[in-house]
Amino acid sequence: MSILDTVSTAWGWVGITPEKVIAENEFGNLIIKDLEGMYWRLCPEDLYCEVIADDDADYNELVKDEEFNQDWFMDVMVNKATEKFGPLEDGFKYHMLEPGALGGKYAVFNIKPIAFERIIKFSGELAQKVHRAGGKKVKFTPLS
């Protein structure tokens, strides 16, 4: 299954119709352009997939933003994860075992390399459970 198919299956409930992956980072975050020309950010550790730019001009402006780039590249976390686990194998990304959106710490003890497709599926399913629960406690079983 392609990553776009995985995004459609796991995250389609938010309204995304992905056309092309524009960028991905070491933690499985994606920037995706949809069929309408909007840009979305899928952020597995924070359990969201949302529009970040309405068109090419907005996206080109966004990528010039220093704060956006610091958040996107996650240099400190990537460096710590690489020190602990070494370089990622093909098809793997670093993953927060307990997502930040559920109180997980942005620390190396909460990180593990996991198959990229599993991260996208898992985060989409968990995000949907959290959304449906409307703020109520959700049963959470970390990926391992």
Image (cartoon, helix red, strand yellow):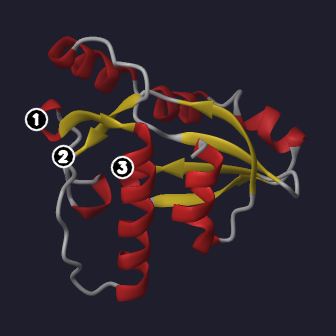
| Label 3 element class | helix
In the drawing, does residue 43 fall left or right of residue 135?
Answer: right
51 left or right, relative to 102: right
Which residue has dot 2 on it?
A: 105
Crowd class of label 2 (few under 14; some 14 to 19; many from 20; radius 10 Å): some
Front of the two marks 2 and 1: 1
Within 10 Å of disc 1 (Cα), the crowding (few <14, some 14-19, many 20+) is few
Question: Looking at the image, is 20 positioned above or below residue 47?
Answer: above
Picture residue at 18% right of the left edge, 46% below the top: 105
- Contact? badges 2 and 3 (CB < 8 Å): no
Seen from this angle, which residue lies furthest left? 109
The disc, 2 or 3, on the residue closer to the chain's N-terminal end is 3
Query: Which label sits in the foreground, 2 or 3?
Result: 3
Q: Image point 20% across, 12% down: which residue?
A: 83
The answer to whether 101 is drawn above or below residue 106 in the figure is below
Classify residue 60 by image quadrant.
top right
Q: Are marks 2 and 1 in contact (CB under 8 Å)?
A: yes
The residue indicated by pointer 3 is 45
Which residue type does callout 1 highlight? Answer: Phe
Q: Is residue 126 left or right of residue 70?
A: left
